[in-house]
Amino acid sequence: MKRIVIFVYGVLCYALSLVAFVYAVGFIGGFLAPTLLDAAPNRPLAQALGIDLALLAVFALQHSGMARPAFKRWWTRIVPEAAERSTYVLLSSLAVGAFFAFWQPVGGVIWQSEGTTRALIIGVYLFGWALLFYTTFLIDHFDLLGLKQVWRQLIGREYRPPQFYTPSLYRVVRHPLYIGWLTIFWAAPTMTVSHLLFALATTAYILVAIRFEERDLVDAFGDAYLAYRRRTPMLVPNVPALGRTPAAAKNEAPT
C-alpha cells in the first residue's frame, strides 16, 4: 500500500510540474495566462519591488537549498527516499505558483516590438522553451521530475541514478538547460521594467547556481567531471565538438 501511495504522490507532483511549466510559457511571454509578468502595476513601486524580490529569494533558496546533497541526506530521514525528488518538484512548483499569483508588475516599457520583429522574438522565446524541454530528456526527464524514482520503488527495483555521460548538446556546452532558461528570460517581445528586473535576477541566480551545481558534480564524479569542464565551455557552445565521440557523462539537476 505504501508503494502505491508514494507512486500516486509522485505522479501528482509530476502533473503539477507540467501545469506550472505550461502556465509559465504564458506568464513570462505575456499571453494566454490570467496573471502576467508584464501586467499593469497596481501597487506603489517600493512595495511591489519588495514583494518581487522576496518571491525571487524564496524560490532561489528553495530551489538551490533542497538540491544540495547535504540537505538531501537530512531530508530523506523525514521523507521516503523514493519520494525525495517528487517532494522537491512539488515544493518547486508551489514556489513557482506563488510567483505567478503574487508577482507585482512595476510598469515602464523599455522596448516594444511590432510586426515581423515581434514574431521573430516570440519564435526565439518559444525555441527557448523547446530547448529547455528537450534538454530535460537528455538528462533523463522522468528522473529529473521524480517519476523514475517512484516507479522503480513501486515495482520493487533498486533506484539507479543517471550515469555520467555527454549526450548531444552536452558535448558542446556544459549547461544547455540554462541556455534554454536564459533564452526564455531575455527573448521578450515587450521588455518592461518588471521583465528586466526578473531577467537580471534570474540570470544572476543561474550564474551563482552553476557554481554550486558544478561543485557537487566534481564531488560526485571527480576527475571525470574536471576533465569535462576543462574541455567544454559553460554557456557559449563549442560547435566543432558536435562531431566528436562522447567521452564522459552528464548528470545534471536544476539548482
Image (cartoon, rainbow, N blue to C red):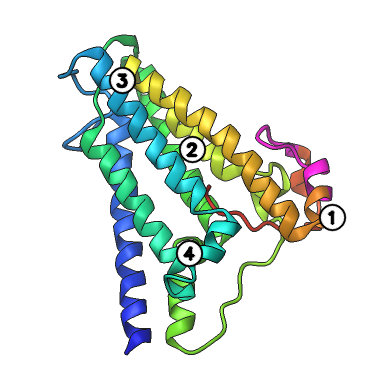
In the rendered image, residue 74, in percent from the top left (x then y), is placed at 52, 64
Answer yes or no: is residue 102 visible. Answer: yes
Q: Are marks 3 and 1 in contact (CB under 8 Å)?
A: no
**Circle nearer the N terminus (3, 1):** 3
Label 3 to label 2, Cα distance in Å?
22 Å
Pick the front one: 165 or 117? 165
Distance, label 1 to label 2, CA atoms, is 28 Å
Amino acid type at mark 1: Asp
Residue labelled with disc 1: 223
From the image, state whether disc 3 or disc 2 is nearer to you: 3
Quarter of the figure with residue 35: top left
Q: Look at the image and say whether residue 238 sits in the magenta stretch.
A: yes
Crowd band around label 3 with a 10 angstrom C-alpha radius: few (<14), some (14–19), many (20+): some
Amino acid at the residue labelled 3: Leu
In this picture, residue 138 sits left or right of residue 14: right
Query: How far apart are the alpha carbons under marks 1 and 4?
Result: 28 Å
Residue identified by numbered label 2: 181
